[in-house]
Image: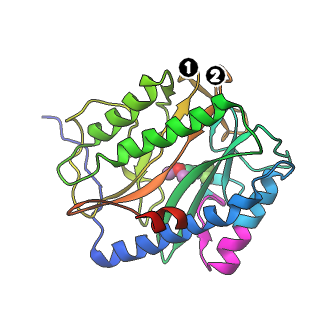
Amino acid sequence: MLMARQSTVTIKSPEEQAIMREAGRLTADVLDMIAPFVVPGVSTDELDRRCHDYIVNVQRAVPAPLNYKGFPKSICTSVNHVVCHGIPGDKRLKAGDVVNVDVTVIHDGFHGDSSRMFMVGKCPVQAERLSRIAHEAMWEGIRQVRPGARLGDIGHAVQRHAESHGYSIVREYCGHGIGRVFHEDPQVLHYGEPGTGLELLPGMTFTIEPMVNAGKRHVKLLPDGWTVVTKDHSLSAQWEHTVLVTAGGVEILTLGAADRAAT
Ligand code: MF3
Ligand code: CO
Ligand code: CO
């Protein structure tokens, strides 16, 4: 008989949930802080430095990406056809660029992980539309989260939204459980079949972070070992939240100040 692989999905206690809530809040605060600096002429290194200094000196927290499996910077900055894991550098952003800034903070031993798209100056309408549909796709996934739902419900909702607008979903990278460990079980695919996969239980925490391509879904890893780009060089967009499954449904741990005020 085949043994099922040991499931290591952690359920966070109320005390752990409270720390995750703070870690998520700090993560969102970094994204709120950096937003006004994402303008034409800024280098992605400067965005990295500002986030690093804010996390370390103001928040007294830890930027999780720094030295994670050898990653050299404190945030990921993924510009235009870069899908994810872009390494900040001396290249300057120019008007019309779109950039995903991905922030992961460790607070009191627990991680918060969130990313947003930023439009640099005035952007082409197709870039605005891709970003908007990727954002909506993430929210379609979040809307599925409640006890008794399954991971396949999330993946299906995300995929349906993106593909119904003529876009494609990257399959090689996915959302993930998160807690004391940056990337823990389960894997949260952004495609799938409703009613399949792991059943959600209160106290689970994971990310939903779809990567949506304007062209084909296929990606390629650059020789730096990190930067993931679209194979056809089409634009790519990504949004990410960390969520907690609650008895009543879902709590989004990484809402920014504007979204917190709106709820
Ligand atoms: N923050 C990314 C995620 O959403 C992971 C970045 S790993 C790094 O899972 F090493 F590239 F920073
Ligand atoms: Co993540
Ligand atoms: Co992230």
| Residue 256 visible to an observer of this rendering | no
Mark 1 Cα-neighbour bin, 10 Å: few <14, some 14–19, many ≥20? some
Name the residue type under label 2. Answer: Lys
Q: Quadrant of the C terminus?
A: bottom left
Q: What element carries label 2?
A: loop
Nearer to us: label 2 or label 1 = 1
Determine whether 110 is above or below 102 in the image.
below
In the rendered structure, which disc, 2 or 1, sits on the residue that comes first in sequence? 1
Question: Is residue 222 something that shows in the picture?
Answer: yes
Position of the N terminus, as image quadrant, is top left
Q: What stretch is highlighted in magenta?
A: 52-67
* Circle 2/circle 1 CB separation < 8 Å: yes
Q: What label does residue 231 carry, if any?
A: 2
Spot occupied by residue 250 in the image (x, y as percentages of width and height): 30, 58
User: Which residue corresponds to the image point at 46% horizontal and 30% vertical from the top-left?
Assistant: 171
Q: Which residue is drawn at 59% across and 75% down?
A: 61
Q: In this view, does 34 lie to the left or right of 41?
A: left
Outermost residue toward the left?
1
Out of 39 and 28, give the one closest to the viewer. 39
In the image, residue 94 sits, relative to residue 159, either above or below, namely below
Residue at left 65%, top 33%?
A: 127
**Percent position (x, y) of residue 15?**
32, 79
Q: Position of residue 143 (x, y in %)?
A: 32, 47
Q: Is mark 1 on a helix, strand or loop?
A: loop
Q: Which of 24 and 76 is in front in this view?
A: 24
Residue placed under numbered mark 1 in the picture: 216
Q: In percent of the image, x 23 and y 44: which residue is there?
A: 198
Foreground residue among 94 and 70: 94
Label 2 to label 1: alpha-carbon separation: 8 Å
Asked if the stretch drawn in magenta spans residue 66, the answer is: yes
Residue 166 on image: x %, y %: 49, 21
